[in-house]
Amino acid sequence: MSSLHTGARIVRKSFSKIKDIVPVPNLIEVQSKSFNDFVQLDFLPAERQNIGLEKVFRDIFPIDYGDKMSLGYISYELGAWSCTCGKLTGVAERYAWSCSSCQASGCSRLSDQLECPSCKALTARYKACHNCLSRVGVKLPMTLGECRSSGQTFSMPLKVRLQLTSWDRPEGGERVVRDIKEQEIFFADVPVMADLYEERGQFVLGNLGTFLINGIDRVIVSQLHRSPGVVFSQSKKVKDLHGKPYYLARIIPMRGMWLDFEFDSNDYLYVRVDKKKKIFITTFLQALGVKRDEIIPLFYSFERIVSENGEFYQEVSDRLLGVRLRHGMVDGEGSAVHVGKLITRDTLAWFKKAGKKDNNNQHNQCCADRFIDTWPLNLRQFKAHFF
Ligand SMILES: [Zn+2]
Ligand SMILES: [Zn+2]
């Protein structure tokens, strides 16, 4: 019979007849390793890999405000690092060392044998506070038990060191740095995986694999994430007054808000940011920095129409391809052949040829044929021009 100790007093006895062949693996190892990789708690900023929190900060910063200012990221510190009396603070003080043989000192992680990086003797020691003789470690305002009994969240403060650079740009010159300020700011209280413990001289989190939020144990459950991309769909449930379905487009970014594009019953195009109130797409585009006059050219090409002697002339171009020629749309010799037919490349070539013969008009433009058409705006008459 084997017995297994779980917790402080509970002894679990096993009455099974089949012996354990393989010990039960650490089932929460994946979660706790993942969280420790995310926070990289007991690491000097220089040692941190570009993963987790570090990657998030490096991706977001620097934030530029035009050419005037830029907010850059330097490093972050999770947890309150200090010695027992609170005289020494910061994770850098934790890894400050000095060597008694060669009197060298520095700030880096030493090997397990405490070998001095400078003289290779095993005499390097981490710095301790002169006042309380303790080394800098993580200080928790409340233990896990205290948090649980008082309904608090087990969390650590996240402080970020940022650099604000302001620039001057003299007229027509290169920009020059006006001022650089560097400051550590409090960012947020981050809930951390319980519990905090020390392993081979290094603080690690998450041997329980749970979080404590407002005094309640919580776990992370993996979920499927809607993959980023653009989705076009047709609403099957909601239809407009004429029974036509709405068409929707959705942009799902890797990070940030979802954008929904939708038409209403008047065929106005709206956008919803994060499924909130809908706003006009033009308002949205202007908010993105597109000028009001530049919105239409972004989506449509222009047709050049000239008014002359009460008639409208249109440029003969590929845009006319596919238009059916009706009686009266075309003047000129031999044009009757083309009436009733779609304009093809051959017809266009014929227009151009016919147009070149006639060089009499005042703009020195070749006026070939007259178009009367209902498109696009019931304009009365068109004449084809070669600009
Ligand atoms: Zn101290
Ligand atoms: Zn040394």
Image (spheres, helix red, strand yellow):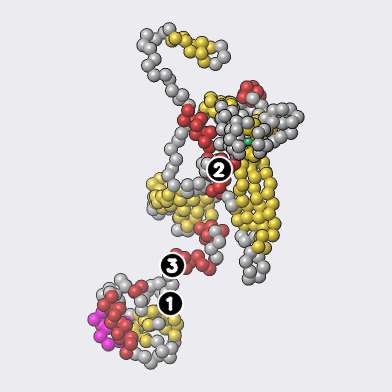
Bin the neighbour count of mark 1 within 10 Å (Cα to Cα): few under 14, some 14-19, many 20 and up.
few
* Residue beneath disc 2: 54
- Mark 1 falls on what kind of element? loop
Dot 3 and dot 2 residues touching (CB under 8 Å):
no
Q: Front-most of 225 and 139?
A: 139
Tell me the quarter of the picture where residue 141 sits: top right
Compared across the picture, whether 74 is left or right of 238 comes to right
336 inside magenta stretch: yes
Q: Residue furthest right?
A: 131
Q: Considering only vertical position in the picture, is 5 above or below 32?
A: above
Residue 254 appears in the figure: yes
The region drawn magenta spans 330-338
Q: Front-most of 288 and 60?
A: 60
Q: Considering only vertical position in the picture, is 17 above or below 173?
A: above
294 inside magenta stretch: no
Compared across the picture, whether 267 is left or right of 194 comes to left
**Looking at numbered disc 2 in the image, what kind of residue is underneath it?**
Glu
Q: What whole-number distance in Å separates the C-alpha atoms at marks 2 and 1? A: 55 Å
User: Which label's residue is closer to the chain start, 3 or 2?
Assistant: 2
**Looking at numbered disc 1 in the image, what kind of residue is underneath it?**
Arg
Q: Front-most of 258 and 236?
A: 258
Q: Residue at x 60, y 53 (%)?
A: 63
* Residue beneath disc 3: 300
- Mark 2 falls on what kind of element? helix
Counting every numbered tag in the picture gives: 3
* Residue beneath disc 1: 304
Q: Front-most of 205 and 131?
A: 131
Compared across the picture, whether 53 is left or right of 356 comes to right
Tell me the quarter of the picture where residue 287 sits: bottom right
